[in-house]
Amino acid sequence: MAETIQGNDTEKPVWKPDRMDEKIAKQRLNVILMVDCSTSMRGERIGQVNHAIHDIKQYLTDLQNENVNVDFYLTVITYSTEAFLLNHDRMKAVEEFDFKDIRAGGWSNLHTAYLQLADLLKKEAKGGIMPDFGGVAPIVLLLTDGHPTKWPLTEEMEILNKLPWFKVAIRYGIAIELNDGRTVQVLRDFVGENGDVITCFDAKLLEKIIKIIVMTASKVKSSDSTTTQGIGQNTENQVTNDIRQQIQQTISDDIDSWEWQDD
Amino acid sequence: MIEFFNKTNVGFSHLKTGKPCQDFSVSYHDETRTIVAVCDGHGSDVYIRSDRGSKFACQAIIDAFKSVRSLVLYGKPKEQVLNKIKMDILCRWNALVEQDLEQNHIGKKEIEMLSERDQFRLKNNPAKAYGTTLNGAMILGKYLLCVSLGDGGIFGVKKGVVTPILEETSDETVANYTYSMCSEDAYYHIHVDFYNIRDYDGVFLCTDGIINPYQNLPNFAKSFILPVYTELANGKRENVNDWIVRLGEKTGYGDDVSLAVMFRTEANRRLYQEARYQ
């Protein structure tokens, strides 16, 4: 049955354009990070992730101050034996996001994170975090360093693939020091055609790669959040190309500096 | 007695980039019927003639609705009647597009700025250049007939209660994605239905440029529909006019904005006049 809305007695409609302006919100750009916190992530890997999230928060706050089009909202899903929303926040305005370092330990139950994500990527009227009208495609980044405990993830992917907000989301996967074709395939299934899987062969580069993905995607999406409409993938292609170029540059810079040090 | 109102204004992002206004709205009234429509031509690069597409969609709604006789709505099985109206609108829009393509071929100059992929898409399906949504409504006798495809929406108001009409249930129209008149499967995404007009005091038709800045129905109903309705019921059309301009050029998301409203004056004038002064 269709939802109905009634103005109640205390809120009679009034014609005050300035007050009516206050009810118009800026576009919301949701950035969702899905972080593997299983035991194998302990040490440098989770440390790099924590550094990256600190910097992302600062970067997005600055970008928001420069950008009149959008407000950034952050969500961090951590998963090990179970999946949790960091600070129990389904989404948090980036300037209010209180980040405390993530600790690692436990299994790698990626399927629980998929279900947590599926709960979020619905319209607000249906219990999710996405706006009922319009909205900007969210950015979702999944990073893992190992094979999921439950496999295959066919059922969970089917649930996600039915969600329109998942279909339009810009999705990236980072495989951390993995030499495992099956896990890379899990990430490929997750990103589909809306993003890329990046293999990070050296955990020292992890922080840089996370930042490049989130920052580039956020910058492109926030500048493109106004009125383009129809059925197309121009923005997604631009994001993917920009990220690929920057990551190649980062990796080659790192190799250059390594060679230089050896010399 | 039925009063009606419609207004379209260009959005600030189109003003900035020099793109034309791709929305179109229209109203029609004669002794038997009142029709309003708002249509939103798509904004992506490939839809190079979507300003015409939205105008043709409004024209198709007016022509198709004018050909509907009230007896038809009683007579045949409902589904058959609705499918006929749906097909009529689609055929009329396609005919207008074909006619325009015959008279004004898509030239090299018009597509030289497009990517190769978009050029290929237009060569395969030139009607894509005219991609648009549509929302239309007609009061005919005791009936309210509505048609909708894609985003934007139709909202009914009864004693201060706002209800979406022909709400898109598939949820597919999220972010900037929408169904389109230029899609091959457009017929399956056009929703048509009729209702008893006594179930509504008035009907609002809006393109997404108006709805999206409010983000959810409770906010949209309280902060836009009910204040606008109250102003219109009080004869303050100029206030609503100014608000639509302001929403398009300053306070909205930069998209073009279109609003069309029909309302019955005898049933609710007192209700909404009183609301204004409390």
Image (tube, rainbow, N blue to C red):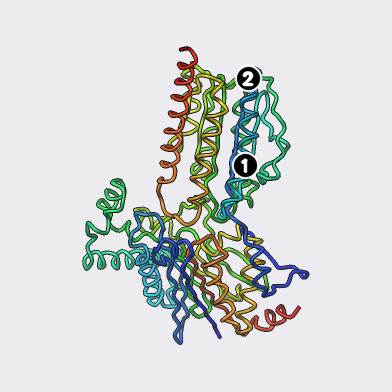
Query: Which residue has dot 1 on it?
Result: A120
Residue shown at 50% from the left, 15% from the top = A261
Horizontal side of residue B1 vs B116, given as left or right: right
Horizontal side of residue B148 vs A122, given as left or right: left
Q: Is residue A114 above or below residue B40?
A: above
Q: Is residue A118 above or below residue B22?
A: above
Q: Quadrant of the C terminus of chain B?
A: bottom right
Image quarter for residue B201?
A: bottom right
Q: Nearer the viewer, residue A123 or A171?
A: A171
Residue shown at 26% from the left, 51% from the top = B124
Which chain is disc 2 placed on? A
Q: Secondary structure at mark 1?
A: helix
Q: Secondary structure at mark 2?
A: helix
Horizontal side of residue B78 vs B56, given as left or right: right
Q: Amino acid at mark 1?
A: Leu
Image quarter for residue A36?
A: top right
Which chain is disc 1 placed on? A
Q: Amino acid at mark 2?
A: Glu
Number of numbered discs:
2
The 10 Å Cα crowd at callout 1, few under 14, some 14 to 19, many 20 or more, is many
Q: Is residue A44 above or below residue B104?
A: above
Query: Which residue has dot 2 on it?
Result: A44
Q: Nearer the viewer, residue A171 or A242?
A: A242
Q: Earlier in the sequence, mark 1 or mark 2?
A: 2
Residue shown at 44% from the left, 29% from the top = A249
Q: Position of residue A168 (x, y in %)?
A: 49, 44
Image quarter for residue B46?
A: bottom left
Q: Quadrant of the N terminus of chain B?
A: bottom right
Q: Is residue B253 above or below residue B242?
A: above
What is the number of the mark on residue A198?
none
Q: Position of residue A233 (x, y in %)?
A: 41, 45
